[in-house]
Image (cartoon, rainbow, N blue to C red):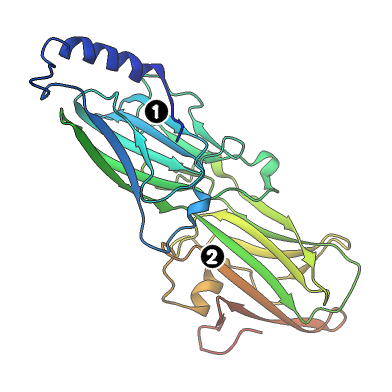
Amino acid sequence: MTNKILHIFYLMAMVSICALGSSCTKEDMSACPGQIRVYFTYAPNTINTSDVNRMHLYVFSGEGTYLGEYIDDRISNFGPDYYIDCSDLTPGTYRFIAWAGKDKQYYETIPGSFVKGQTTYDQALLKLKHSGDVVSTLIPHIFHAQLSNATVVLQKVQRFEMPLTQLSNTIHLRTVGLPADENRYAFTIEDNNCAYKFDRSRTMSSLCNRFAYTASCTKDEFSQLNATLNVLELSAERRTPRLHILNKTTGTTLYPVGAQSGDLIGLILSAYPQNNFETTHTYDILLAFSGNAVTGYRVSITINGWQVRHENGELID
Protein backbone atom coordinates (compact mmCIF):
# COMPACT_ATOMS: atom_id res chain seq x y z
CA MET A 1 0.00 0.00 0.00
CA THR A 2 1.35 3.42 -0.97
CA ASN A 3 -0.06 6.52 0.72
CA LYS A 4 0.67 10.00 -0.58
CA ILE A 5 0.32 12.19 2.51
CA LEU A 6 0.09 15.97 2.48
CA HIS A 7 2.77 17.88 4.34
CA ILE A 8 0.27 19.15 6.90
CA PHE A 9 0.30 15.80 8.66
CA TYR A 10 4.07 15.53 8.50
CA LEU A 11 4.41 18.90 10.22
CA MET A 12 1.81 17.99 12.81
CA ALA A 13 3.69 14.78 13.53
CA MET A 14 6.99 16.62 14.02
CA VAL A 15 5.41 19.04 16.49
CA SER A 16 3.80 16.18 18.33
CA ILE A 17 7.03 14.15 18.52
CA CYS A 18 8.99 17.14 19.82
CA ALA A 19 6.38 17.79 22.47
CA LEU A 20 6.28 14.17 23.58
CA GLY A 21 9.99 13.42 23.27
CA SER A 22 10.87 14.14 26.88
CA SER A 23 8.11 11.89 28.27
CA CYS A 24 8.36 8.99 25.80
CA THR A 25 10.94 6.57 27.23
CA LYS A 26 11.67 2.86 27.00
CA GLU A 27 10.51 2.43 30.57
CA ASP A 28 7.29 4.41 30.05
CA MET A 29 5.80 4.31 26.55
CA SER A 30 2.35 5.55 27.51
CA ALA A 31 3.05 8.95 25.97
CA CYS A 32 4.67 7.62 22.79
CA PRO A 33 2.99 8.20 19.42
CA GLY A 34 1.01 5.11 18.40
CA GLN A 35 -0.21 3.59 15.18
CA ILE A 36 -3.55 4.76 13.80
CA ARG A 37 -5.23 2.58 11.19
CA VAL A 38 -8.41 3.34 9.27
CA TYR A 39 -10.11 0.23 7.86
CA PHE A 40 -13.05 0.02 5.46
CA THR A 41 -15.85 -2.45 6.06
CA TYR A 42 -18.57 -3.87 3.83
CA ALA A 43 -21.05 -6.73 3.94
CA PRO A 44 -20.09 -9.91 2.03
CA ASN A 45 -21.02 -9.91 -1.67
CA THR A 46 -22.24 -6.29 -1.58
CA ILE A 47 -19.39 -4.80 -3.60
CA ASN A 48 -16.90 -5.99 -6.18
CA THR A 49 -13.60 -5.42 -4.38
CA SER A 50 -11.74 -5.05 -7.69
CA ASP A 51 -13.68 -1.81 -8.22
CA VAL A 52 -11.99 -0.30 -5.16
CA ASN A 53 -8.64 0.48 -6.77
CA ARG A 54 -7.99 3.82 -5.08
CA MET A 55 -8.85 5.48 -1.78
CA HIS A 56 -9.05 9.17 -0.95
CA LEU A 57 -9.42 9.91 2.78
CA TYR A 58 -10.21 13.49 3.80
CA VAL A 59 -9.66 14.65 7.37
CA PHE A 60 -11.68 17.46 8.90
CA SER A 61 -11.64 18.83 12.43
CA GLY A 62 -14.47 17.96 14.76
CA GLU A 63 -15.96 21.34 13.87
CA GLY A 64 -15.79 20.55 10.15
CA THR A 65 -12.69 22.46 8.99
CA TYR A 66 -10.44 20.80 6.41
CA LEU A 67 -7.08 19.64 7.80
CA GLY A 68 -5.57 17.38 5.15
CA GLU A 69 -5.94 14.17 3.17
CA TYR A 70 -4.44 10.79 2.37
CA ILE A 71 -4.40 9.32 -1.14
CA ASP A 72 -3.73 5.74 -2.14
CA ASP A 73 -4.22 5.49 -5.90
CA ARG A 74 -2.67 2.05 -6.42
CA ILE A 75 -4.71 -0.46 -4.45
CA SER A 76 -3.91 -3.86 -5.91
CA ASN A 77 -5.91 -6.12 -3.61
CA PHE A 78 -8.61 -4.35 -1.63
CA GLY A 79 -10.16 -6.38 1.18
CA PRO A 80 -10.92 -6.48 4.92
CA ASP A 81 -7.21 -6.18 5.80
CA TYR A 82 -6.70 -2.99 3.80
CA TYR A 83 -6.17 0.20 5.81
CA ILE A 84 -4.90 3.76 5.57
CA ASP A 85 -2.10 4.58 8.00
CA CYS A 86 -2.91 7.85 9.79
CA SER A 87 -0.28 7.54 12.50
CA ASP A 88 0.82 11.15 12.06
CA LEU A 89 -2.47 12.48 13.43
CA THR A 90 -2.16 14.09 16.85
CA PRO A 91 -4.67 13.38 19.63
CA GLY A 92 -8.00 15.05 19.05
CA THR A 93 -11.41 14.60 17.48
CA TYR A 94 -11.70 14.36 13.70
CA ARG A 95 -14.23 13.75 10.97
CA PHE A 96 -13.12 11.25 8.31
CA ILE A 97 -14.64 11.21 4.82
CA ALA A 98 -13.52 8.64 2.27
CA TRP A 99 -14.21 8.41 -1.44
CA ALA A 100 -13.10 5.13 -3.00
CA GLY A 101 -12.74 4.83 -6.77
CA LYS A 102 -12.25 8.58 -7.12
CA ASP A 103 -10.37 8.70 -10.43
CA LYS A 104 -9.53 12.32 -11.23
CA GLN A 105 -10.17 11.62 -14.90
CA TYR A 106 -13.87 11.16 -14.09
CA TYR A 107 -14.49 12.86 -10.73
CA GLU A 108 -13.54 16.22 -9.27
CA THR A 109 -14.06 18.07 -6.01
CA ILE A 110 -15.60 21.48 -5.56
CA PRO A 111 -13.71 23.56 -4.65
CA GLY A 112 -10.97 22.08 -6.81
CA SER A 113 -8.33 22.49 -4.10
CA PHE A 114 -9.18 22.44 -0.41
CA VAL A 115 -7.45 25.02 1.79
CA LYS A 116 -6.28 23.99 5.24
CA GLY A 117 -8.19 25.81 7.95
CA GLN A 118 -10.59 27.42 5.46
CA THR A 119 -12.50 24.87 3.39
CA THR A 120 -15.34 23.33 5.38
CA TYR A 121 -17.10 20.01 5.30
CA ASP A 122 -20.37 21.74 4.39
CA GLN A 123 -18.80 23.39 1.33
CA ALA A 124 -17.21 20.25 -0.09
CA LEU A 125 -18.73 18.46 -3.09
CA LEU A 126 -17.78 15.50 -5.25
CA LYS A 127 -18.84 15.89 -8.88
CA LEU A 128 -18.91 13.63 -11.92
CA LYS A 129 -17.28 15.32 -14.90
CA HIS A 130 -19.59 15.47 -17.94
CA SER A 131 -18.26 17.73 -20.63
CA GLY A 132 -20.91 18.80 -23.13
CA ASP A 133 -23.65 17.10 -21.09
CA VAL A 134 -22.48 13.67 -22.31
CA VAL A 135 -20.60 10.88 -20.53
CA SER A 136 -19.39 8.58 -23.29
CA THR A 137 -16.94 6.40 -21.35
CA LEU A 138 -17.64 3.74 -18.73
CA ILE A 139 -17.20 5.58 -15.45
CA PRO A 140 -15.50 3.80 -12.53
CA HIS A 141 -17.69 2.94 -9.58
CA ILE A 142 -17.64 5.36 -6.65
CA PHE A 143 -17.89 4.51 -2.95
CA HIS A 144 -18.38 6.65 0.16
CA ALA A 145 -17.57 6.20 3.83
CA GLN A 146 -17.93 8.56 6.77
CA LEU A 147 -16.86 8.59 10.40
CA SER A 148 -18.22 11.72 12.05
CA ASN A 149 -16.57 11.45 15.45
CA ALA A 150 -13.13 9.82 15.37
CA THR A 151 -11.29 10.48 18.61
CA VAL A 152 -7.54 9.89 18.40
CA VAL A 153 -5.85 9.11 21.70
CA LEU A 154 -2.37 8.10 22.80
CA GLN A 155 -2.25 4.33 22.62
CA LYS A 156 -0.08 1.73 20.94
CA VAL A 157 -2.51 0.82 18.17
CA GLN A 158 -5.82 2.51 17.43
CA ARG A 159 -8.23 1.11 14.86
CA PHE A 160 -11.11 2.92 13.15
CA GLU A 161 -13.64 1.29 10.84
CA MET A 162 -15.57 3.08 8.09
CA PRO A 163 -18.49 1.28 6.38
CA LEU A 164 -18.29 1.63 2.58
CA THR A 165 -21.40 2.40 0.57
CA GLN A 166 -21.51 2.07 -3.22
CA LEU A 167 -23.02 5.10 -4.95
CA SER A 168 -23.14 3.82 -8.52
CA ASN A 169 -24.89 1.15 -10.58
CA THR A 170 -24.19 -1.02 -13.60
CA ILE A 171 -26.89 -1.38 -16.26
CA HIS A 172 -26.53 -4.22 -18.78
CA LEU A 173 -28.82 -3.97 -21.81
CA ARG A 174 -29.66 -6.80 -24.19
CA THR A 175 -32.30 -7.24 -26.90
CA VAL A 176 -33.99 -10.21 -28.56
CA GLY A 177 -36.32 -10.27 -31.57
CA LEU A 178 -34.80 -7.47 -33.62
CA PRO A 179 -34.31 -8.13 -37.35
CA ALA A 180 -30.77 -8.07 -38.71
CA ASP A 181 -29.70 -4.74 -40.17
CA GLU A 182 -26.60 -2.66 -40.80
CA ASN A 183 -27.65 0.20 -38.56
CA ARG A 184 -25.62 1.52 -35.62
CA TYR A 185 -27.30 1.90 -32.23
CA ALA A 186 -26.55 3.64 -28.94
CA PHE A 187 -27.79 2.94 -25.42
CA THR A 188 -28.34 6.07 -23.31
CA ILE A 189 -29.57 6.92 -19.84
CA GLU A 190 -30.46 10.55 -19.24
CA ASP A 191 -30.25 11.86 -15.68
CA ASN A 192 -29.43 14.93 -13.60
CA ASN A 193 -27.61 13.29 -10.68
CA CYS A 194 -23.97 14.33 -10.92
CA ALA A 195 -22.82 15.64 -7.53
CA TYR A 196 -22.75 14.64 -3.88
CA LYS A 197 -22.14 16.51 -0.68
CA PHE A 198 -19.52 14.96 1.58
CA ASP A 199 -22.26 13.30 3.64
CA ARG A 200 -23.19 11.45 0.37
CA SER A 201 -26.49 13.32 -0.02
CA ARG A 202 -27.25 14.44 -3.56
CA THR A 203 -27.16 18.07 -4.54
CA MET A 204 -29.62 19.27 -7.18
CA SER A 205 -27.91 22.57 -7.85
CA SER A 206 -27.18 24.13 -11.23
CA LEU A 207 -24.11 21.87 -11.35
CA CYS A 208 -26.35 19.05 -12.49
CA ASN A 209 -28.30 19.99 -15.56
CA ARG A 210 -29.68 17.01 -17.44
CA PHE A 211 -26.98 14.96 -19.19
CA ALA A 212 -26.69 11.56 -20.88
CA TYR A 213 -24.59 8.49 -20.24
CA THR A 214 -24.13 6.83 -23.61
CA ALA A 215 -22.51 3.69 -25.04
CA SER A 216 -22.42 2.28 -28.55
CA CYS A 217 -24.24 -1.03 -28.83
CA THR A 218 -22.45 -4.10 -30.07
CA LYS A 219 -24.24 -6.86 -31.97
CA ASP A 220 -24.04 -10.58 -31.24
CA GLU A 221 -24.17 -13.39 -33.78
CA PHE A 222 -27.95 -13.02 -33.92
CA SER A 223 -27.75 -9.25 -34.63
CA GLN A 224 -29.07 -8.46 -31.15
CA LEU A 225 -27.88 -5.39 -29.27
CA ASN A 226 -25.70 -5.41 -26.16
CA ALA A 227 -24.37 -2.50 -24.13
CA THR A 228 -23.31 -1.61 -20.59
CA LEU A 229 -23.41 1.67 -18.69
CA ASN A 230 -22.26 2.64 -15.21
CA VAL A 231 -24.35 5.44 -13.70
CA LEU A 232 -24.44 7.28 -10.41
CA GLU A 233 -26.78 6.02 -7.71
CA LEU A 234 -30.33 5.03 -8.63
CA SER A 235 -33.04 5.63 -6.05
CA ALA A 236 -36.74 4.83 -5.67
CA GLU A 237 -37.37 8.45 -4.65
CA ARG A 238 -35.82 9.91 -7.80
CA ARG A 239 -37.71 9.18 -11.01
CA THR A 240 -35.55 11.23 -13.38
CA PRO A 241 -33.40 8.57 -15.17
CA ARG A 242 -34.69 7.79 -18.67
CA LEU A 243 -33.58 4.83 -20.80
CA HIS A 244 -33.31 5.11 -24.58
CA ILE A 245 -32.02 3.09 -27.51
CA LEU A 246 -31.20 5.32 -30.45
CA ASN A 247 -30.73 4.34 -34.09
CA LYS A 248 -27.67 6.42 -34.90
CA THR A 249 -27.89 5.61 -38.60
CA THR A 250 -31.44 6.88 -39.13
CA GLY A 251 -31.57 9.33 -36.23
CA THR A 252 -34.71 7.67 -34.82
CA THR A 253 -35.61 6.17 -31.45
CA LEU A 254 -35.87 2.39 -31.20
CA TYR A 255 -36.96 2.45 -27.55
CA PRO A 256 -39.14 3.63 -25.87
CA VAL A 257 -42.05 2.85 -28.20
CA GLY A 258 -45.68 3.96 -28.10
CA ALA A 259 -46.78 5.20 -24.69
CA GLN A 260 -43.72 3.84 -22.93
CA SER A 261 -41.60 6.52 -21.25
CA GLY A 262 -38.31 4.76 -20.55
CA ASP A 263 -38.68 5.64 -16.85
CA LEU A 264 -35.88 3.43 -15.54
CA ILE A 265 -36.88 3.58 -11.87
CA GLY A 266 -40.50 2.95 -12.76
CA LEU A 267 -39.51 -0.08 -14.82
CA ILE A 268 -37.44 -1.53 -11.97
CA LEU A 269 -40.22 -1.02 -9.43
CA SER A 270 -42.82 -2.43 -11.82
CA ALA A 271 -40.69 -5.54 -12.24
CA TYR A 272 -39.86 -5.93 -8.56
CA PRO A 273 -41.55 -3.51 -6.12
CA GLN A 274 -39.44 -4.78 -3.21
CA ASN A 275 -36.16 -3.91 -4.94
CA ASN A 276 -33.55 -2.56 -2.52
CA PHE A 277 -31.67 0.17 -4.36
CA GLU A 278 -29.01 0.44 -1.64
CA THR A 279 -27.87 -3.16 -2.03
CA THR A 280 -28.73 -3.97 -5.66
CA HIS A 281 -26.03 -2.42 -7.80
CA THR A 282 -26.42 -4.33 -11.07
CA TYR A 283 -29.46 -4.46 -13.35
CA ASP A 284 -29.70 -6.81 -16.33
CA ILE A 285 -32.35 -5.46 -18.70
CA LEU A 286 -33.72 -7.61 -21.51
CA LEU A 287 -35.92 -5.95 -24.14
CA ALA A 288 -37.86 -8.47 -26.22
CA PHE A 289 -39.09 -6.97 -29.50
CA SER A 290 -41.97 -8.28 -31.59
CA GLY A 291 -43.50 -6.80 -34.75
CA ASN A 292 -41.43 -4.75 -37.15
CA ALA A 293 -40.31 -1.22 -37.92
CA VAL A 294 -43.07 -0.69 -40.49
CA THR A 295 -46.12 -1.67 -38.45
CA GLY A 296 -44.51 -0.81 -35.14
CA TYR A 297 -42.70 -2.76 -32.45
CA ARG A 298 -44.07 -4.13 -29.22
CA VAL A 299 -41.57 -4.48 -26.40
CA SER A 300 -41.73 -6.62 -23.27
CA ILE A 301 -39.11 -5.99 -20.60
CA THR A 302 -37.42 -8.19 -18.02
CA ILE A 303 -35.13 -6.81 -15.31
CA ASN A 304 -32.98 -9.18 -13.26
CA GLY A 305 -35.32 -11.99 -14.29
CA TRP A 306 -38.51 -10.13 -13.27
CA GLN A 307 -41.11 -9.19 -15.86
CA VAL A 308 -42.12 -5.52 -15.98
CA ARG A 309 -45.87 -5.08 -15.47
CA HIS A 310 -48.42 -2.26 -15.55
CA GLU A 311 -49.89 -1.08 -12.27
CA ASN A 312 -52.96 -3.28 -12.95
CA GLY A 313 -50.71 -6.35 -13.11
CA GLU A 314 -50.73 -6.80 -16.88
CA LEU A 315 -47.46 -7.34 -18.70
CA ILE A 316 -46.01 -4.29 -20.44
CA ASP A 317 -45.69 -4.86 -24.17
Front one among 165 and 269: 165
Name which residue type carries label 1.
Glu
Closer to the chain start, of discs 2 and 1, is: 1
**Image quadrant in which you'd find residue 27:** top left
Task: Classify the position of the C terminus by image quarter.
Answer: bottom right
**Image quadrant in which you'd find residue 153:** top left
Element class at badge 1: strand
Residue 140, percent from left and from top: 57, 48
Q: Residues within 10 Å of mark 2 (few under 14, many from 20)?
A: some
The reply, left or right, for residue 152 in relation to residue 121 is left
Name which residue type carries label 2.
Thr
Residue 213, percent from left and from top: 66, 53
Which residue position holds label 2?
Answer: 282
Vertical side of 44 occupied by 213: above or below: above
The outermost residue toward the left is 27
| Residue 117 appears in the picture as rendered | no
Do the residues bearing badges 2 and 1 touch, measured as CB atoms within 8 Å?
Answer: no
Name the residue at 48% across, 78% down: 272
How far is the residue under mark 2 from the one under mark 1? 31 Å
Which residue position holds label 1?
Answer: 69
Residue 202, percent from left and from top: 44, 47
Name the residue at 33% across, 30% down: 59
Name the residue at 40% across, 47% down: 201
**Image quadrant in which you'd find residue 121:** top left
